[in-house]
Structure formats: C-alpha cells, structure tokens
Amino acid sequence: MIPNQKNTLAILDSGLNGAGWNAGFDQNWLELHARGERPDLLRFHRNRPAACIGRHQAIDRELRLDYCHGHDIETVRRISGGGALYLDENQLGITLIIRRPPNWGDLQQILARFCAALAEGLARLGIHARYKAPNDLEIGGRKLASAFFATAGDSLLLHATLLLDADIKTMLEALRAPTEKLTATGLESARQRLITFREMLGEVPPDAVLQQALRQGLASRLDAGCVDAGKPGDIDESRVFPTLDPACMDWSDTGGTALEALHKTAGGVLRVRFWPDTEEKFIARLQFAGNLHLHPADALERLQHALTGLPLAQLEAAALAFFCVHHCELIGFTANDVRHLLRLALNKLEQRRKMGLSTAQANGLMVLDAATGSAATDILARASVMLLPYCAKPAWCKWRYLDGCTECGKCEVGDAYRLARERNMQVTSVTSYEHLGATLAEMKNNGAAAYVGACCSQFFVKRHHAFRDAGIPAVLMDIGGANCYELKQEEAAYAGEFHAEARLDADMLRQVMQFVPAIKDHRSR
C-alpha cells in the first residue's frame, strides 16, 4: 500500500487491457480513494478495441451494436459523462484521481484546468494544443483529445484519451455519431476533423517519453511530487467494482408508445422520452439521456423520479423547482434547457392529438422555434416556404440533383410540390449543404415568417446551428429510407453527390400540410 502523502501522485502504467477492466479499475480506485484507502493516482493505460459511452447516454442512439458485436468490439459504459468514444491501442488513456482542489473552481473550470495541464505536458513535446469547451483539446480546430470527470465524495476522477493514431474506418463503423461536435461545416472528412500524434510528428513517441512529458505537466499544475506505484499486480485490487451496465438506457424497444424529444445545447444533446397515462393527463414514466457532463451524476435519475406521476401541466414548473431545491452543476446547459426539452416533448403529444399522427410520426416532427416555443400548428399557420432534400427524389429522376420537380406523380416529392403550390408556397429542393445555407439566408432576408420541410433527424442534430442561426421558425419531418449517416456517406451527401434514396412519409406529409392555410398571398401572414 502506498501512503496517501500530501501532494504526491502515485504513478502507474497498467499497459494494455480491456476497456471494461480499465473502467472498473478507475471506478474501484475512485471509491476507495473517497474512503481514504487509496492515494492520489496518475495512471497511463491502453485499451483493446471498445465502444465506450458516457454515463447518461442511450446506447442504441450512440453505437452500431450489430457491428460492435460482430467484430469483437467491447461495449462499455463509463461512470463519467460526455459522449461516445471508440477506444483501441492507438490511444493513450490518462486517469487522474485526486481530492477536488478547492482553488480549481466549478467543474467546467476543472475540466479546463485538466486540459491545460495536459497541454502543458504536450508542449514539452513541441505539441501546442488548446482547450475547447466543454471537454476537448484541439490543434488548429482539430480534435486531439477528450476529457471527462466523475466524482465520489470529495474525490475527483479526471480522464482523457490522446489520439496517437486513429483507425477512422472502424471508428465510423462502431459509433453512430462519432463526429457530432467536431466541425461546423460537415464538409471535411472525419480524418480532417481529428489530428493524431503520428500526423503531427511523423511517428508516435515511445510511451516513456509521452508519459514523462505528461506527468511533468500534471505534477507542475498540481504542485505535486511523483512516486512509482509499481505494477498493477503489486497493488491489492482484489475487488473491482462492476462498471455500469452498457445495456441500461437501451431505447431501441419502446413498443411504439413513447414520445421522444431532443434539444441541442452548448453542452451536448439532451433527450427525453415519456409515457403518459391512459387518459394522457399524467406522466406514467419518463427517462432522460444525453452526452452531458453534470454533478451529481444521478441528478437526471432523481429528476425522473420527481416528475413521474405528476400532471402534464405541472411538468415544466416542477423541473425548474427541482433545480432550485437541488444544487447541480450543469456544464454547458441550464435548468431552462431541461424545461425547454420537456416543452418540446409535451408538444409532441399535442401534435399527435391535433394532427392525427401516430406516435412514430409525432416523434418524427422536429420543431424549431427557440424564441417563443410555438406549437407546430402555430408555425405551420405562418409557413410560406417548403424545403425538400434532393435525396428523397428517385435515383432515376432527371431532377434528382436539381432544384425543381415536374410533379409527374411517381414519387412523394412530387406530392409535396403539389401540396405546397396549392398553398402558393415557394418550394426549393435543397441540393447541397451549401445550398441550404444560401437558401436560409435568402429566406431570412426576404422576411419569411416560417417554413416547413424534411430532413433526417441526424442531420437536424448535427447541423442544428444552420437552422438555428437563420432564426426562422420551422416544422421539419424526419425522412426514412437510405441515410447518409448510416451509410457513412455524410461528405458526399453534403456535397450533393449522395446516390441512395431517402423517403418522405406521404401520409405524414398530408397530415402536416392540412395545417398550412391555402391562401393566395403569404405576405399577409
């Protein structure tokens, strides 16, 4: 046993292990550290191939489970928050377990200080990285590392993964949304969004060199000395805490009865799904998820418990009251973001009722109106423009990659054009991501009050800023069929070169469009 000396870091290189073993080791040490039975620790480690999700994520929304299971990729849920990662031996894992420094500020500041300490170590190797909130290290806008935290009592676990090299192909296969936060444009390839030691230096430095630089940077920031902790086998770790079950919060099987909503915040994507009672007056059950950082870690679970059984009308106020009573550190989002998410979810129920939609169709409606939180029907009543994705046109259509439609009656896009023109709406087939930006800018300049459109939900989440920055209320319908994210052809789709066929839900389209008035002059709206 190493004595828990003040300002002394026990240094351990545990080598290559399974990601579950590594996560369990960290969890074990953190719990024992909180009880005063373990010293401060700085551990370096590598992982065998694994897909690792954050404490609060819904596993099927983040991982391609069939691919992982078919390629011997371990699935692990870590005790820290944040987003999904693909881990393998090409990355160096760093774990720091210490008492929470009183002068490091709140948890957002702590993540920033941890990243700054890593950056100080990297600078000793000639690598100059900078912190990007909420939890990344970047070089020239390209991601080099992600950092995460967990707590137990006043003990703090900080860990990060440095990209020494990268197996981009496997990463894209294993994770559903591996690049969600990495770029604003979406026009670069995944490799261009990441940066590795091999790319910067031409080779990966020996572990001893890497570890020496990083331990010096961290020890300097902590004003701590270092002592060798020996080998993992030399330490009494007879009991390893089980890591959180990766299958918990599997949202793949809801029986078609749960209403879902999501809200993009600066700190990540917030999700909720809920089941009303049979009379649709009370909350029978609900569940939150997201790639978020917060403390205490079980705050969302406690909020779920507090809201269950309440009348639907009290939901938003009760959520705000919860955060007034319970002190929570929310990184990159606020209690008002949670309230807004719940309003979006309740609106799904109202949309289903008013518009005669199925639960799946209601879940497929994406409503954008951050300013007032208007209901879908109110936005549709003001809509003067329809935007449609080129990928929903048949591959054989000569208008597939052009803005326009002859309304030949052989696909749902023609039906959409007809429904829009019956209402004297402007219709645009969006032919690329660049075209979308230009179209939204033109609509804003022309004073468009609202619009209706279609896109896949993954595009809405990843490129939310494009819709948000235009500042125009919208009702968007999710599309089915081929999906560029599932097919890993995002770059081709954004450039207007995606060849597979998406599909509009014709019934949903008709139900939605009945709420757009058939008037002759939209300027009067």
Image (cartoon, grey):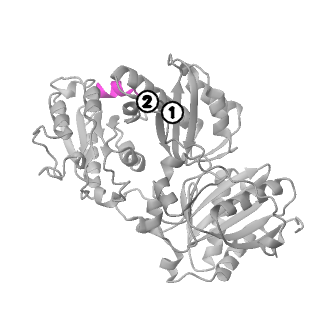
Name the quadrant of the N terminus: bottom right
Q: Which residue appears at 25% of the width and 28% of the height?
A: 510
- Residue 517: image x %, image y %? 23, 23
Task: Say whether residue 128 is left or right of residue 111.
Answer: left
Q: Amino acid at mark 1?
A: His
Closer-to-camera residue (138/79): 79
Q: Which residue appears at 43% of the width and 58% of the height?
A: 183
Q: Amino acid at mark 2?
A: Gly
Above or below 76: residue 257: above
Separation of residues labelled 2 and 1 (CA atoms): 8 Å
Report the magenta residues as a range: 372-381
**In this rendering, does residue 219 appear at all?**
yes
Q: Secondary structure at mark 1?
A: helix
Q: Which residue appears at 44% of the width and 65% of the height?
A: 193
Q: Earlier in the sequence, mark 2 or mark 1?
A: 1
Residue at the disc numbered 2: 373
Q: Residue 264 lies in magenta, yes or no?
A: no
